[in-house]
Amino acid sequence: MNKYLQLFRLGNCVMGVIGLVLATLIAAGTDIQYHLSELVIAGGVVFLFIIGGNALNDFLDREIDRTAHPERPIPSGRMRPGTAARISVAAFMGSVALAVPLPLEAFAIVVVAITVMLAYEGTTKKMGLVGNLSIAFLTASLFLLGGAVVQRLDATVAIAAMAFLATLGREIVKDVQDMGADVDRFTLPQRIGARKAGIVASASFLFAVALSFEPYLAGRFGIAYLAAVLVADGIFIYCSGVHFRDPKRGQRWAKIGMFVALIAFLMGGTL
């Protein structure tokens, strides 16, 4: 693979833009046709943001990757570390510059997300729960950005909160699963034990379920949303129990639950 495309993780970039488009559809519905220019700009912001994060990760983890991912551009010798660092800086700066014409709320979300990403790669990644919270926020911020781009931030707050809680639960479950291999991170399971950390993860999943009713009770979405989100809720409830026996299955079903929840919000926003 081309070393630059491998550094960028092009698939992740495309998935991020798709996530933004879906979030914007949830917020604007059929009115998205009036916000196409903002959507294109925001898509570029997300694309560059992900490139910046991936390049920074490869630069900082270059020694670890010699063993864990020797095929990546830096450990394989196809790219100098300084090149990846410069690409990261340029991508983050480009992301901020491109966000300037967007509504103020959208610009603020981009700046905060970049700050959280830099802190994560530099420090909080190894801080266990703080790192989990950082990843959860970055996931949620994509949905917040989708709402802010069309000046309907209120329409995506609920799914952003669900994404935050579901991602937090999944990250904690992953740390339980990797408890024996984590030697350079002080994770929540290592602090309080696997079972207590699992209870925190379950609470996150169940709080996501509780929040899922808000758009229906507030009258923003109708019965189609409720029917679909109940399926997602069932999956999250299942996750809240199964991960104690099988963490790998728990985190896998959490991803499925988030996908079903996204479909539910799309139905609510467009039907």
Image: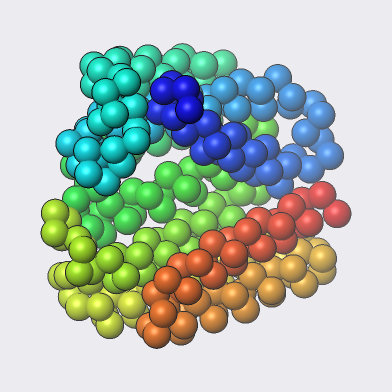
Indicate left or right for 156 with 79 as reference. Answer: right
Indicate left or right for 233 with 111 as reference. Answer: right
Quadrant assignment, res 153: top right
Residue at screen point 58% across, 61% down: 258
Q: Nearer the viewer, residue 97 or 68?
A: 68
**Residue 97, placed above or below residue 112:** above
Residue 90 at what x, y percent from top left?
37, 14
**Color scheme of the displayed model:** rainbow
Residue 167 at what x, y percent from top left?
45, 59
Indicate left or right for 16 with 231 as reference. Answer: left
Residue 38 at what x, y percent from top left?
66, 23
Q: Nearer the viewer, residue 118 or 55?
A: 55
**Residue 5, placed above or below residue 199:** above
**Residue 269, placed above or below residue 62:** below
Q: Quadrant of the C terminus?
A: bottom right
Residue 96 at what x, y percent from top left?
44, 20
Residue at screen point 33% across, 77% down: 198
Residue 51 can be seen, yes or no: no
* Label total for image: 0
Residue 175 can be seen, yes or no: yes
Quadrant assignment, res 243: bottom left
Residue at screen point 59% across, 34% down: 14
Q: Nearer the viewer, residue 113 or 10?
A: 10
Residue at screen point 74% across, 52% down: 266
Quadrant assignment, res 144: top right
